[in-house]
Image (cartoon, helix red, strand yellow):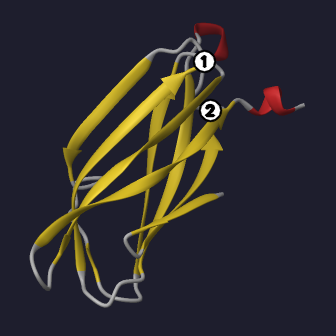
Amino acid sequence: MVQKITEGVSVSVDTFYQPAQSNPIKQEHVFVYRITIENQTPNPIKLQRRHWVIVDSNGIKKEVDGEGVVGRKPVIEPGASYQYISSTLINTDIGKMFGTYEMMNLYNRTLFKVAIPEFPLVYPFKLN
């Protein structure tokens, strides 16, 4: 697990390789990631947007922008957390992801960015 705290918001990431959905012979590697966002600020926050950077070991970079996460724009109260699971496919057996969330402080309606820490995507065989 990797974790980073930005502006009082903690983002933790766990990753899992998905052998049943992957096809290494075709260079298709599917990874699931579980994100936990914890609001350590004194105000409720709302996740507005996400920006992901996905890089494979060939240096091919994909960027993904969009509203919310998995179809939602969750409100996270002070001291609470929000967790979701998503996935990505890369064409090499090693890669990485990182990014940012755009959050809104619901007390004063200001927007701020929260870093998503860089995390590795590694085919388990490579760890041996």
Give the image quarter of residue 21: top right
Which label belongs to residue 20?
Answer: 2
Q: Secondary structure at mark 2?
A: loop
Residue, disc 1: 57
Q: Position of residue 87 (x, y in %)?
A: 46, 41
Q: Is residue 18 visible?
A: no
Q: Mark 2: which amino acid?
A: Ala
Which label belongs to residue 126?
Answer: none
Q: Is residue 19 visible?
A: yes
At 24% from the left edge and 38% from the top edge, which residue is drawn?
65
Mark with earlier residue (1, 2): 2
Q: Mark 1: which amino acid?
A: Ser
Q: Position of residue 1 (x, y in %)?
A: 66, 57
Badge 2 density bin: few <14, some 14–19, many ≥20, Cα 10 Å: few
Q: Secondary structure at mark 1?
A: loop
Residues 4 and 63: in front is 4
User: Please, is residue 27 above or below residue 1 in the view?
Assistant: above
At 36% from the left edge and 39% from the top edge, which residue is drawn?
52
Badge 1 density bin: few <14, some 14–19, many ≥20, Cα 10 Å: some
